[in-house]
Image (cartoon, grey):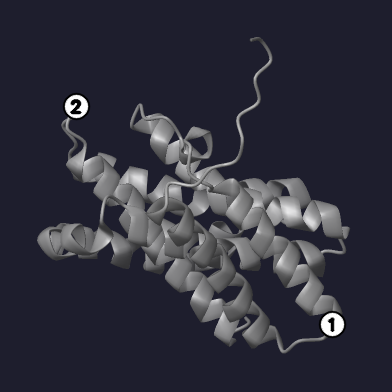
């Protein structure tokens, strides 16, 4: 098993996405959630994007079935939410912190996995984006919320930018660990600026 820097960063991404999903369920004002529903929401948020990526690539068994450390990361994230809900609530700022860190990490790791499977650059960039956003889409759907990708602030586009940058730096033979950090930071940076200044892509108007 690969216990590289990127592997541990990936586990960290799993954990923060679990926290994002579990907190979303725990704090939802319109639903009562027991421990299982909180765990399940965190679980599906963490593995949703990676599972879809693995299925698309034919990478079986999917990552969380193949690697028990992923399940441990999910379990630890869930325990942190249950044991430290007040502290995490103060840190998360309406899920923004954990969701943003998660999409940054998942974007570059999803892109790298696609490239390792010999997928073309365009498809690798899209799979990196899908890895990052799909778990959040499932989470928001379960919570009966409008998914982030349909809200005004730049979200999926930030992931796509990070994917493209990772591919370019990979072509230019930039150190793999530095590439991961730089490309993930670009995703996080774009997302932070978009939320801070309420930025979004132009709307398409089909009918005036």
Q: From this viewpoint, is residue 167 visible?
A: yes
Q: Residue at x 17, y 32 (%)?
A: 29
Q: Is residue 54 left or right of residue 95?
A: right
Query: Callout 1: helix, strand or loop?
Result: loop
Residue 161: image x %, image y %?
67, 59
Q: Residue at x 61, y 78 (%)?
A: 182
Q: Residue at x 77, y 52 (%)?
A: 57
Residue 96: image x %, image y %?
35, 55
Badge 1 or badge 2: first in the primary sequence = 2
Q: Is residue 94 left or right of residue 5?
A: left
Residue 30: assigned label: 2
Q: Is residue 123 left or right of residue 83?
A: right
Query: Callout 2: helix, strand or loop?
Result: loop
Residue 158: assigned label: none
Measure how far apart labels 1 and 2 are at the Cα level: 49 Å
- Tag 1 residue: 172
Residue 160: image x %, image y %?
67, 54
Residue 129: image x %, image y %?
64, 52
Q: Nearer the viewer, mark 1 or mark 2?
A: 1
């Amino acid at each position: 098993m690969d216990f590289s820097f990127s592997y541990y960063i990936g586990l960290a991404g799993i954990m923060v996405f679990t926290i994002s999903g579990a907190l979303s369920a725990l704090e939802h004002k319109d639903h009562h959630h027991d421990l299982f529903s909180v765990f399940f929401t965190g679980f599906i948020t963490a593995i949703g994007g990676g599972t879809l990526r693995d299925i698309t690539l034919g990478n079986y068994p999917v990552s969380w079935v193949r690697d028990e450390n992923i399940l441990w990361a999910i379990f630890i994230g869930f325990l942190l939410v249950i044991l430290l809900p007040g502290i995490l609530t103060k840190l998360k700022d309406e899920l923004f912190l954990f969701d943003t860190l998660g999409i940054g990490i998942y974007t570059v790791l999803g892109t790298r996995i696609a490239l390792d499977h010999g997928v073309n650059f365009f498809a690798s960039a899209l799979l990196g984006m899908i890895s990052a956003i799909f778990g959040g889409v499932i989470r928001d759907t379960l919570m009966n919320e409008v998914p982030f990708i349909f809200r005004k602030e730049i979200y999926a586009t930030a992931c796509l930018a990070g994917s493209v940058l990772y591919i370019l730096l990979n072509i230019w033979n930039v150190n793999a660990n530095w590439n991961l950090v730089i490309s993930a930071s670009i995703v996080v940076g774009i997302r932070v600026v978009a939320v801070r200044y309420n930025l979004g892509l132009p709307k398409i108007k089909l009918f005036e």
